[in-house]
Image (cartoon, rainbow, N blue to C red):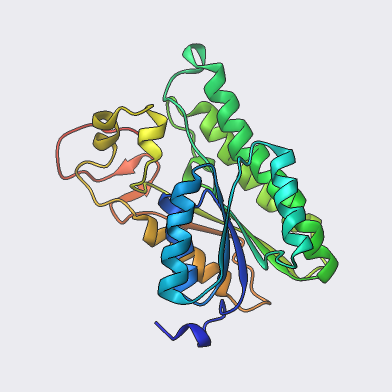
Amino acid sequence: MFPPSASPLSDRRVLITGASAGIGAAIARTFAAHGAHLELGARRLERLEALAEELGREHGVQVNCRQVDVRDQAEVQAWIDDLDRTERIPDILVNNAGLSRDLLPVQEGRVEGWDEMIDTNIKGLLYMTRAVLPHMVARDSGHVIHIGSTAGDTVYPGGNVYNATKFAVKALTEGMNLDLVGTRIRVSSVDPGLVETEFSQVRFRGDDERARKVYQGYTPLSPEDVAEVVRYVASAPPHVNLARTVVYPTDQRNPYVLHRREEGAGEEE
């Protein structure tokens, strides 16, 4: 690793949603280690504050945190308005906040879970991007990075609405790039396969045993693996846009083909 002072991310300001755990927290740690200043948002403020204290102490970067629910457009806009007033509009926006609920056929689906996924994974991403992007357009620089999923490529049984939200992220990445042609603003997505995070505990509503089986018998990606890919995408030269980067664990070759070294059907992410 080169020293932070030599990193393309040094002194860049990066906003990360869903930063209190998992991939979002790993991205924050990776970017801070490369000298980036951070604006971190999530619903769990205590976790954010602990992370901010850790990163500021270890890396000497500015880390600010905000309790925010990306599903609330007014909260999102108020956050970005505050950043604008204090001249802290990000150079890089990482739309990481996302979740899944249940693994049920549509005819048995829970509407409240559908709403939560659609409001977080699609509308939350749109609210954040709509608030930040005009500032990037005004200065003709910036980078928006979405954390998508291989679930945006292939539908799996019970995935239905979650798959639909990640297909939407893929379409929005493509559409935003078209809308921004002629500017120097890049829009990218990083789309991981199976990553061991709190994702499955959230999907299965706290059923730890069921969540554990998702990652049994193979080596999944870690949040740090995904964070390193995000760092690579964000560090590309300004004339290079890695518009879509798909990353699997070596034991997984597409959403359906997974080599398990132990018995057990497991479930999709």
Which percent across, then down, holds residue 240? 64, 74
Which percent across, then down, holds residue 26? 42, 59
**For the view shown, which residue lies furthest in the left direction?**
262
Viewer-side residue, 155 vs 89: 89
In the rendered picture of this protein, how many numbered marks are placed on residues? 0
Answer above or below: position of 42 versus 202: below
Q: Quadrant of residue 132?
A: bottom right
Q: Quadrant of residue 142?
A: bottom right
**For the view shown, which residue lies furthest in the top direction?**
107
Instruction: Look at the image and tell me in which quarter the N terminus lies.
Output: bottom left
- Give me the residue at 62% from left, 74% from top: 12
Q: Is residue 147 left or right of residue 22?
A: right
- Give me the residue at 44% from left, 86% from top: 3
Q: Looking at the image, can residue 228 be seen?
A: no
Viewer-side residue, 245 vs 60: 60
Which percent across, then down, holds residue 109? 50, 16
- Give me the residue at 60% from left, 78% from top: 11
Answer above or below: position of 84 versus 48: below
Viewer-side residue, 216 vs 178: 216
Q: Is residue 229 left or right of residue 258?
A: right
Q: Looking at the image, can residue 95 be seen?
A: yes
Instruction: Look at the image and tell me in which quarter the C terminus lies.
Output: top left
Q: Quadrant of residue 199?
A: top left
Which percent across, then down, holds residue 244? 57, 58
- Give me the residue at 15% from left, 35% from top: 263
Answer above or below: position of 137 versus 112: below
Answer above or below: position of 71 versus 25: above
